Amino acid sequence: MERWNFLVKLFETCCSKLSISQLHSHCLKVGLVHDSFIVTKLNVLYARYTSIHHAHKLFEETPHKTVYLWNALLRSYFYEGEWVETLSLFRRMNYVSSMSIEESQRPDNYSVSIALKSCAGLQKLLLGKMIHGFLKKVRIDDDMFVGSALIDLYFKCGQMNDAVKVFMEYPKPDVVLWTSIVSGYE
């Protein structure tokens, strides 16, 4: 337990390429690079403080990818404005999960909301509608953040009626959905 507390503290203090490289080397040395929590944390640090390419390299070197690791890289590409790469990675995640029986690799509401936001940024309505159809199929379309991303997508693609329709599907919209619908009309 002390070792984990120590590592968590180390992750919190890393903020340079050198400190991240040293932490990564230590994790390699003691055999922690097979731990999904550690790899995900390292991935986030590489993306935040060095480059997305280092994060992607670590991702590719990881044999067992959890949804958290996929989401960490999706998020990193999205916030770098790399929406095409975000969608490419989401498609790959979807493909890998369709070939696997493991739940741990399937896209979740966070993965989907990032993909929808990327569609909105690129104004890829057709792809966004395909993802919306996927949501209904796997029944994760009731999440407020997914709903917000759908509303944003439809507004940015000029589909006001579809945006309102999504909003109306929520019996008790929260502040996230209200903000999305109001922002769409601005």
Image: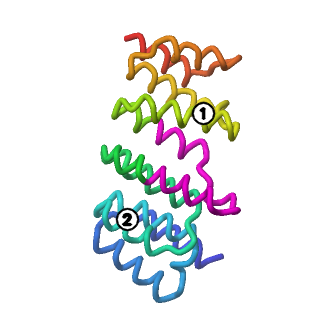
Q: CA distance from mark 2 to mark 1?
A: 31 Å
Which residues are drawn in magenta? Answer: 89-116
Q: Is residue 143 above or below residue 79?
A: above
Residue in the image at 48% along x and 64% along y: 41
Q: Position of residue 19 (x, y in %)?
A: 33, 73
Is 102 contained in the magenta span?
Answer: yes
Q: Is residue 173 above or below residue 80?
A: above
> Going by the image, does 150 lie left or right of 84?
right
Residue in the image at 48% along x and 56% along y: 92
Q: Amino acid at mark 2?
A: Ala
Q: Which mark is residue 59?
A: none
Callout 1 secondary element: helix
Q: Which mark is residue 133?
A: 1
Please tell me whether the stretch drawn in magenta is mainly helix, strand or loop.
helix
Q: Quadrant of residue 16?
A: bottom left
Q: According to the image, label 2 marks what residue?
A: 55
| Quarter of the image that includes the N terminus | bottom right
Who is closer to the viewer here, 66 or 126?
Answer: 126
Q: Position of residue 61 (x, y in %)?
A: 44, 75
| Quarter of the image that includes the C terminus | top left
The earlier-in-sequence mark between 2 and 1 is 2
Q: Quadrant of residue 18?
A: bottom left
Render colour scheme: rainbow
Who is closer to the viewer here, 122 or 104?
Answer: 122
Near mark 2 (Cα within 10 A), the count class, few <14, some 14-19 or many ≥20, is many
Residue in the image at 61% along x and 59% along y: 105
